Image (spheres, rainbow, N blue to C red):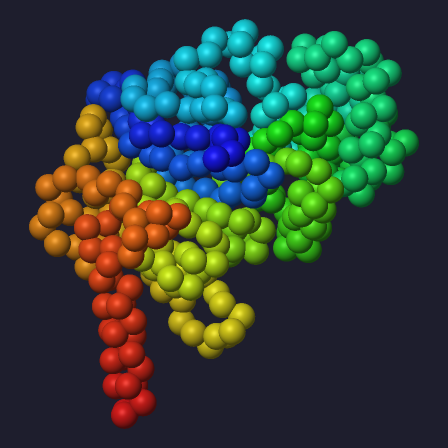
Amino acid sequence: MTTPLLEAENLTVQYETANGMLTAVSDASFTINTSEYFGLVGESGCGKSTITKAALGGLDDNGRITAGKIRYKGEEIQDYTEKEFNEKLRWKEISWIPQGSMNSLDPLQRISEQAAMIARVHTDLSKDEAVERLREMFDIVGLPKERVTDYPHQFSGGMQQRAVIALALFLRPSLLIADEPTTALDVIMQDQVFKYLNEIKQDGEIGMLLITHDISLVFESCDRMSVMHAGQISETGTVETIYEEPHHPYTILLKEAFPDLRYPDRELGIIEGNPPQNMGEVDYCTFVDRCPWAVPECQEQAPSLEPVGGDEDHPVSCFRREEVLEEYRAENETVAQTGGDQ
């Protein structure tokens, strides 16, 4: 069996606050394979970006991994020091496109100078070698190679975003973590950015962890995905499986909240309520107060990720994972028939 590119195993991340330990991620597990595009989906505050920071050794000062493991190419990295992350992983193995990435460019430095600085800290490349590699990446993301010596303010917003992607790729990492990479872009520019990312996937052996609240973006761009709610992994599977056969209540309702071109007149769904703020040990399903199919057991313990119908590649953390989808479909069919009779 091939060693996964990145693994999270029963990962729990907590932040120390004035009110106690806030649990941002609880017992989360997933794997990303070599050259795979993997989506991590959920609403704001569900723990997606915390997982990213944990994988990069970039948790805030009050945050720490309190349980579980993170492995990169089979090696545990959750206890790496800052020096080890810099020497072994950052930029040359795992690279990051952060939220608000256009603001991450230094306005006082040319793009080529920023690339040279990254190379100096993380590799033994000379300045000329680093700039030449950046030129190659500019060409890949659709920017004129001669513009590597421009300042950020000389680029449009979309061009700045592509420059950030070029910087993330120029040391040829094996894993690209993209945290809401198109948040500040219009729809046309979002499409262009993902066109380039998909071309990069076809041309080289690079995997991507796409962090987003937009489940439709993951359906379009990724191979597999996990859905998160309030720190817990709700469901994992191929994008086709989760699109056609979602089995966690949150996944079902999240999918219904996004438009589908096949049904332009369909009324979008609404997930009532708000996710909880989890303090200390999370010993219940975090979706229980918002779930229309909840049972008492959901409040008594946290469900573990278990296969649906024996499919090891489609685990779901729901006590009713084998029946919720059928109930949902039956309810919708009843509503449709009632509406037709009227």
Residue shown at 40%/66% (left/top)?
268
Residue shown at 41%/13% (left/top)?
79
Name the side, left or right, on which 106 lies relative to 53.
right
Q: Residue furthest bottom?
A: 341
Name the side, left or right, on which 151 lies relative to 48.
right
Q: Foreground residue, 317 or 259?
A: 317
List x then y, in percent, for residue 217. 54, 53
List x then y, in percent, for residue 205. 66, 36
Q: Residue furthest right?
A: 146
Q: Which quadrant holds the C terminus?
A: bottom left
Which quadrant would residue 167 be assigned to in this image?
top right
Name the side, left or right, on which 110 lies relative to 233.
right
Residue shown at 49%/67% (left/top)?
260
List x then y, in percent, for residue 139. 83, 38
Q: Residue furthest front?
A: 1
Which quadrant would residue 98 be assigned to in this image?
top right
Residue shown at 35%/18% (left/top)?
64
Is any part of residue 267 visible from this angle? Answer: yes
Name the side, left or right, on which 15 lies relative to 206.
left
Is any part of residue 43 visible from this angle? Answer: no
List x then y, in percent, for residue 290. 23, 52
| 78 versus 282 height, above or below | above
| 342 versus 210 height, above or below | below
Which quadrant would residue 231 be assigned to in this image?
top left
How many labels, in total?
0
